[in-house]
Image (spheres, rainbow, N blue to C red):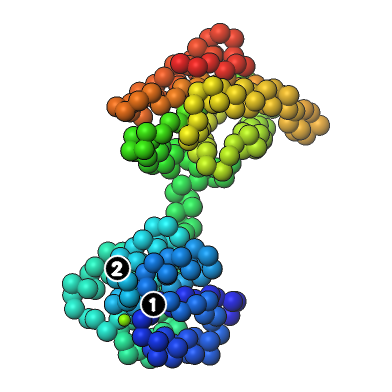
Amino acid sequence: MDDIKILIVEDELLIATTLQRKLVKMGYSVVDIVSSGMKAIEVAIEKKPDLVLMDIVIKGDMNGIETASKLYDTTRIPVVFLTAYTDENTISKAEATGAYGYLIKPFQERELTTTIRMALKKHEETMKMEQLATTDSLTGIMNRRFFLQAIDKEIERTQRYGNRFSLIILDIDHFKKVNDTYGHSAGDEVIVSITQIVNKNLRKVDIFARYGGEEFIICLPETDYPNAMNVAERIRQNIEDNFIPYDDKKISCTVSIGVTNFHENGDTYDKIFQRADAALYLAKNQGRNQVVYQ
Ligand SMILES: [Mg+2]
């Protein structure tokens, strides 16, 4: 068995240490034993276990069910509940957290291994599905659907805390000509190459997605428009200076970029997008290979 790391959340020390001994005997490693929800989240973030075994009645303000749901939202680490409770209400609450399994105490070693194995397998599949659903397969960056979810959260955050953000839409100039001249796989190379250049100019917090064929979208949190213009201009220049090797040729291309920023409370994604799109349209109309703010 590869080294599978497990975190035990259990307020009764004797139960916890017995469980730890069993797990180690089965070949798992136990990263820690904690007895409260707060501590569980802290340790899970720090030690990144592959799985959490979570008692339902634990110390502190949060019970195991609340902890599990918070833990999964922040870390995506799968949780298996351990409990003496078998009433319908508790079970359905536990199920609602998206738990990966449920062990009723006392349980046999055999149930323990099977439940852990099934939980890990189910989790791996879920992560694969999530990855497929949120990522653009050619470039590995976010897809449009995931971007729309992320931007909704950003707008909510912006409205709540009075922050600001900027939005950039970028479109490859004469992309059809690249495809027609060099073929579609050259077109793919161009798209991948441009993705890499954009990525080099972004921070970790920026949200970057492929919006459609040759169109990309970027949300720059906590960024006002002069700074967003600088980022956009640097991207435009880097792309213009770049040559993409393809067969024995070197393909060069340019991009047009529309920039806008979040105005004030009441600004919606539709309005923001329309401004950026109008700016992009202007950039195209004024001769391409340029950045326009609206
Ligand atoms: Mg307990």
**Lateral position of residue 90 relative to residue 74, left or right:** left
Q: Which mark is residue 35?
A: 1
Q: Residue at x 50, y 17 (%)?
A: 293
Which of pointers 2 and 1 lies earlier in the amino acid sequence?
A: 1
Residue type of the residue flagged with mark 2: Asp
Crowding at dot 2, Cα within 10 Å, few <14 / some 14-19 / many 20+, comes out as: few
Q: Is residue 17 above or below residue 184?
A: below
> Picture quarter containing residue 265?
top left
**Lateral position of residue 278 relative to residue 241, left or right:** left
Separation of marks 2 and 1 at Cα, in angstroms: 11 Å
Q: Nearer the viewer, residue 249 or 87?
A: 87
Counting from the top left corner in percent of width and height, residue 173 is at 60, 20
Q: Is residue 77 above or below residue 135?
A: below
Q: Nearer the viewer, residue 172 or 72?
A: 72
Residue type of the residue flagged with mark 1: Ser
Q: Is residue 26 visible?
A: no
Residue highlighted by disc 2: 61
Disc 1 secondary structure class: loop
Disc 2 secondary structure class: loop
Q: Is residue 64 above or below residue 144?
A: below
Counting from the top left corner in percent of width and height, residue 215 is at 52, 28
Q: Residue at x 62, y 16 (%)?
A: 289
